[in-house]
Amino acid sequence: MSTATAAAPPRVAGAAPSRSSPALPLAIGLAVAPVVAVLQSKALAPIALVALAGCVLRHRQRHGAWPWPRGAALWAGLALFAWGAASALWALQPVKAFGTSAQIGGFFLLGAAACRAVAADDETAKRRLMLAACVGVAAGLLVAGLDAATGNAVRAAVRGLKETPPHLVFGLKPAASAMALWLPLAAAVPGLPRVWRGAVLAGGAAVVLLLPGETPKIAVLAATAAGGAALLAPRLAPRLLGAGLAVSILLMPFALGPVLARGVPADGLVPSAAHRLLIWDFVATRIAERPWLGWGMESSRAVPGRDANPSSAALGRFNLSDPAAARWELLPLHPHNGALQLWLELGLPGALLGAALALLLGSAAARAARPAVATATLAAGAASAMLSFGAWQEWWVGAELMAAAAVAALPRRG
């Protein structure tokens, strides 16, 4: 997002506006990604990789120069991954720590370059990109709704299954979060009256709210609130969102830790939410053991005690008497909270860099061609990042980078 307002390289006179458009690969990616995400969310990583790389290569083809990204947000992100690579010196899994830092850091750099490439494209290409994104999300929501209504028969058929296993329902949740992230782009579709754009957004939000998973629902509500605020205060609201995210990242373990240590009644929550409280309680104690440097990049998967079950005392603090809760792992894969993951793995420096990145993304959203759309997208992504997915999951990073590139290509009004 930070590259949306960067100075773009000069256009080559006479360049074909559509055939060599740098935005075309992203338009194709966003047109197919939602449906593919419903069928298999992990496929978003290669789709994003090909789409973003295509944007960069087409920019090179058109302008004769690489779209080197720039801006403070770029340097904050690169510094975060450089710190992650340095943490391999003390990480519990040093090879994985360095490898993930290099891989996701390179992905981030590619996404930033793609942002600059599409930002330099012509307005016609940008408008086509928004239309493709809207059509893609609509198709994805249609397939997701059909799958949910038929008891996941669509995804079972794709996998060649005659019977639908119970766990297949969980596969819709990542797709719903990705579509909640991309849905605000429909507000920038050209040629649609405001009433129709509102109907598309409302209909899409309604479908997400009906799909399984609490995080996508929260993401849609957060996007609606943040986008509405940015309509009223297009320069102030995005910056306040960025500042709020930065403060949340810095204070998360100090705000959650003492509350969870005293215990929170969780018996009335859905199992996934109750499990998260136990996870966050465990993670807060591990953060307190190594607050300065953290346990190292990707150490969430190896931190001591992560595969243990909650003690009877912990279950009692949270009023959890269901026998199933006693079998939950204290930290399955990642903390399900981006702020806590930064603190756990990268310590105070990682939290500071993550907070700086959030602050700068808020400022970039305020400078976007359509601040309300950019702010809604940022809010949806932040909600999912704080409640559900691992910070370094390739498919989720790819979904975020495609959203950032689309925001960089938001067309001007008129």
Image (cartoon, helix red, strand yellow):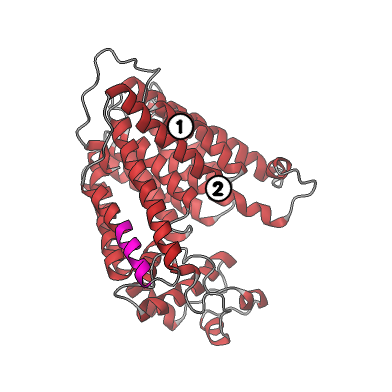
- Mark 2 neighbour class, 10 Å CA radius: few under 14, some 14 to 19, many 20 or more: some
Element assignment for label 2: helix
User: What residue is drawn where x is 53% and y is 73%?
Assistant: 266
When the figure is inspected, residue 101 is found, relative to residue 152, above or below; the finding is: below
Kind of residue sitting beneath label 1: Ala
The CA span between labels 2 and 1 is 19 Å
Which residue is situated farthest in the right direction here?
Answer: 162
The answer, for residue 42, to whether it is visible in the render is yes
The quarter of the rendered structure image containing the N terminus is top left
Q: Is residue 157 left or right of residue 44?
A: right
Q: Is residue 407 left or right of residue 76?
A: right
The quarter of the rendered structure image containing the C terminus is top left
Kind of residue sitting beneath label 2: Lys
Q: Are marks 2 and 1 in contact (CB under 8 Å)?
A: no
Q: Which mark is residue 133?
A: 1
Q: Which mark is residue 42?
A: 2
- Mark 1 neighbour class, 10 Å CA radius: few under 14, some 14 to 19, many 20 or more: many
Which residue is situated farthest in the bottom direction here?
Answer: 313
Label the magenta part by its dominant secondary structure: helix
Residue 47 coordinates in the image, percent (x, y): 50, 38
Magenta segment range? Answer: 81-90
Which residue is situated farthest in the top direction here?
Answer: 14
Task: Give the mark nearer the N terminus: 2 vs 1.
Answer: 2
Residue 307 coordinates in the image, percent (x, y): 56, 75
Residue nearest the observer in this picture, 84 or 133: 84
